Every structure is written in C-alpha cells, then in structure tokens.
Image (cartoon, grey):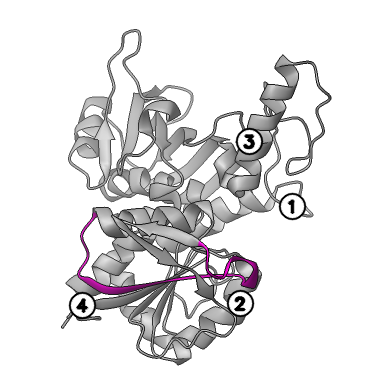
C-alpha cells in the first residue's frame, strides 16, 4: 500500500520537477497520476524509471487521491483545487491564488511546519513564491536569534521563473544575437539575452511590482507580521537558479561569526563563505541541489545591528517543486496522511 498522488500541470517545468523529486526522495507512493490540459492528454512524462501518460485535469475524479500537487497556474488552481479538496485530496498549490487566504496555511517546512495544522479549513496548503521560499529559510534562524526588524532584498531571478516559455525565449534570443537575427521580446517586456529587466509580474499602484509585493506579504505571513521588507525583483539571463542580495536590520546586536554558525546548523541551508576568489556560490552551481546556499556573510555598518548575505537556490526545486514535496513529507510525518 502507499499514497495516491496526483500532479496537476505535469507537462510544465515545475510539474516535471515535482515528479522527479517525488521519485528521488522515495515517498511511499503506490500510484501517481499525471494531469494536464486537454491538449496534453496521452503525452508521456517520466516518474523515476517509469513512463506515465497524462490524463485530463478538466474531468479527472480526485476521489481516492491522497495528495494533489498543483503546478498549473492561478486560474487553473482556482477552478480545480477546491474540487480536488472537496473530493478528499489534500491540495498543495504552487500558484499565488491561495497564498494570502487566511484559511490556507502558507508553508515552508524548515520555517513554519506547525502551521500545517490549519490545512483542514479548506484542505488546501499554499506553496510560497519562489523568491520568498529561499529567503525565509535564511531569515528564520536569524529572526529567532536576533529579531529581524527590516529586510532590503534585490533579487536576480532566472528565466525559468517564467516557465518553459521564458527559458525558450532566453535561448532563442541568445542564438539570434550570435547569428545577427532580429530579437523580438514576447514572454518578457524587453530583451532578456545579455540584459537584465527590473520588472517581474504586474505593476501596482505604489510603483512596486506584484512579485515585490508577494515577497513582503508572504514573508510576514510565514515568519512574523512585524517584519518590514522592501524588494526589487530583477529578471536576469540565467536559465535556472535565483540569487538574492539581502541586507537585514535586527533588533539585537549581531556578531557575524555567530550568525554564520547559526546559519550553518539551520535546516535547509548550506554555507559556502570563503573570503577568496570563488569562495561563494553562483546560480549555475546550485542547479539540481536541494539546499539553499548562503555566501558573502558580513556586517552592514550603515545601520544598527546590520547583516548582509548572498542567497542562492534552484528556483524549480526549493522555490517550487521541492518545497511542495517537502510539505507532502510533512503531512506524512505528522500522520495527517497515511501510506497504509
């Protein structure tokens, strides 16, 4: 016996990564159902060494499914996640649709695992934004030790954050430039190849983008509503891996060596912080890894109790698929779902 897990959006980059991580981490799964849009019915996807065929999400009956992992976008989640939850599946949704719903817990297992107890109000658990997920793993142990007052973060987010179309656009534009073909932005607002774009998601009334707003409100919901956070989110010509330059102002005095050790023993983090050439992690090096990497830890002398660091993670893993699978593991560990 084992779990029946359904993956909605199984043909997308995050859905495929969910299937990969489910197989890698060896969850007790007896049945996996791959779900996608009607145009992908019958398409083969991989689950470990097995090949499974996609079924239609639109008319799938979720009765008997233990956990439904959704990687299909906000509109699809809004329509089908409640239907799956009503049928008895616990939904773990990667879209932004349910994140700020007060009746839906927003979970990063290394940070706020106990919040999973609130899943039963709607039978839905939300996965945070990719840039938020890696950030809060780094912030939580420092908040516990020093009390974080304010965070200023600049992100360097890869093209894969915009899905397969974003990755394809980066590849096609790069090739076009080398062969002197015209470059036509489609997925992004401006040329992404050999460029950076200070714009992710829609602009809001105060001049922030929705991506920047998400980082603020999600960090408060996950860690502490009193934390002030200001973000500038930038798309960069990297295929996979998000990076963040983070400056933190704390309530208590911070010793950088003590902070480094606190981060070193915290769950989900790896510290690579040598003050020498190459003594840090770049996004290219984190691809395929489960950990969030921290480098460039140093005191910020411009504010009282200031600390700065560099945070890098595979956004398709910790920023999306891995965190969702870790939530599924948390449900097992807490006995909320049983594999027998």
Q: Quadrant of residue 67?
A: bottom left
Q: Residues within 10 Å of mark 3 (few under 14, many from 20)?
A: many
**28 in the magenta segment:** yes
| Mark pair 1, 3: CA separation | 13 Å
* Front residue (pair 110, 317): 317
The residue depicted at 21 percent of the width and 35 percent of the height is: 264
Residue 211 on image: x %, y %: 62, 50
Residue 78 tag number: 2
- Quarter of the picture holding the N terminus: bottom left
Q: Earlier in the sequence, mark 4 or mark 3?
A: 4
Which of pointers 2 and 4 indicates the residue nearer the eye?
4
**265 in the magenta segment:** no
Left or right: 172 in relation to 114: right
Q: Is residue 82 above or below residue 179?
A: below
Instruction: Count how many numbered circles sit on residues in the image.
Output: 4
* Residue position for label 3: 235
* Residue position for label 4: 2
Q: Is residue 277 above or below residue 104?
A: above
Q: Residues within 10 Å of mark 4 (few under 14, many from 20)?
A: few
Q: Earlier in the sequence, mark 4 or mark 1?
A: 4
Residue 270 on image: x %, y %: 25, 35
| Mark pair 2, 1: CA separation | 19 Å
| Secondary structure type for disc 2 | helix
The residue depicted at 44 percent of the width and 46 percent of the height is: 149
| Secondary structure type for disc 4 | loop
Q: Earlier in the sequence, mark 2 or mark 1?
A: 2
- Magenta residues span 25-43
* Front residue (pair 9, 227): 9
* Front residue (pair 46, 202): 46
* Front residue (pair 10, 217): 10
């Amino acid at each position: 016996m084992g779990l029946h897990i359904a993956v909605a959006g199984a043909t997308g980059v995050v859905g495929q990564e969910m299937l990969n991580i489910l197989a890698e981490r060896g969850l007790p799964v007896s049945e996996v159902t791959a779900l996608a849009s009607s145009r992908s019915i019958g398409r083969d996807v991989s689950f470990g060494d097995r090949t499974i065929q996609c079924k239609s999400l639109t008319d799938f009956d979720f009765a008997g499914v233990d956990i439904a992992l959704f990687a299909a976008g906000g509109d699809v989640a809004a329509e089908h996640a409640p239907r799956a939850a009503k049928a008895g599946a616990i939904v773990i949704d990667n879209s932004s649709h349910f994140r700020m719903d007060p009746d839906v817990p927003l979970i990063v297992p290394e940070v706020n695992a106990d919040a999973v107890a609130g899943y039963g109000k709607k039978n839905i658990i939300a996965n945070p934004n990719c840039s938020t997920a890696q950030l809060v793993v780094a912030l939580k142990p420092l908040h516990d030790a020093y009390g974080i007052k304010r965070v200023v973060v600049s992100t360097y987010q890869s093209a894969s954050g915009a899905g397969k179309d974003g990755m394809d656009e980066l590849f096609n534009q790069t090739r076009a430039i080398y062969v002197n073909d015209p470059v036509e932005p489609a997925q992004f607002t401006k040329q992404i190849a050999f460029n950076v774009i200070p714009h992710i998601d829609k602009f809001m009334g105060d001049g922030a983008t929705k991506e920047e707003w998400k980082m603020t409100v999600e960090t408060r919901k996950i860690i502490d509503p009193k934390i002030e956070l200001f973000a500038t989110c930038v798309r960069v010509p990297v295929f996979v891996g998000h990076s963040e330059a983070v400056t933190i102002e704390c309530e208590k005095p911070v010793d950088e060596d003590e902070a480094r050790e606190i981060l070193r023993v915290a769950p989900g983090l790896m510290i690579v912080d040598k003050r020498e050439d190459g003594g840090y992690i770049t996004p290219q090096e984190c691809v395929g890894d489960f950990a969030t990497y921290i480098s460039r830890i140093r005191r910020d002398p411009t504010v009282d109790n200031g600390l700065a660091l560099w945070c890098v993670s595979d956004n398709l893993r910790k920023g999306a698929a891995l965190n969702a699978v870790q939530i599924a593991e948390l449900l097992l560990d807490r006995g909320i779902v049983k594999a027998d």
